[in-house]
Image (tube, helix red, strand yellow):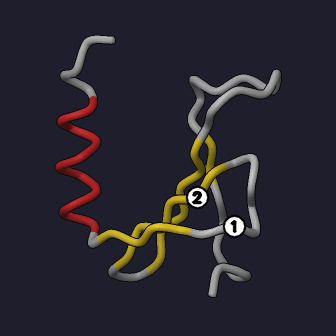
Amino acid sequence: MSTDLVWFKSSYSSNEGGDCVEVAEAPGTVHVRDSKDKSGPQLAFKPAAWKAFVEFAATVEV
């Protein structure tokens, strides 16, 4: 399923480990996976749902 996808990690992620996700875009779908478990499970979202999540996450203070 994901062998042809090009995965991107957030520019906020470091190479020192930690919790990171990777995202890959395909026609009509945004795939998300754990950067530490590249062969593990993935989530798939419609682009509009992913956009809404990212916009919401940008407003949350941690």
Q: Nearer the viewer, residue 2 or 27?
A: 2
- Residue at the extreme top: 62
Relative placement, left or right, of 41 versus 53 is right
Quick one: label 2 or label 1, which is nearer the N terminus? 2
Q: What residue appears at the point 17 percent right and 49 percent down from the top-left corner? A: 52
For mark 2, give the secondary structure.
strand
Image spot of residue 23 (x, y percent): 53, 56
Relative placement, left or right, of 62 versus 24 is left
Image spot of residue 51 (x, y percent): 24, 52
Q: What residue appears at the point 27 percent right and 66 percent down from the top-left corner? A: 47
Measure how far apart labels 2 and 1 are at the Cα level.
Answer: 7 Å
Q: Which residue is mark 1?
A: 40
Q: Which residue is mark 2?
A: 33
Task: Please state, as top left, top right, bottom left or bottom right, where the N terminus lies in the image.
Answer: bottom right
Task: Identify whether 35 is placed above or below 5.
Answer: above
Place residue 59 in its image quadrant: top left
Image spot of residue 24 (x, y percent): 54, 63
**Are circles 2 and 1 on residues that touch, CB within 8 Å?**
yes
**How many C-alpha atoms fall within 10 Å of the one at disc 1: few (<14), some, or many (≥20)?**
few
Residue type highlighted by circle 1: Gly
Q: What residue appears at the point 38 percent right and 76 percent down from the top-left corner? A: 29
Task: Identify whether 51 is placed above or below 29.
Answer: above
Place residue 13 in its image quadrant: top right
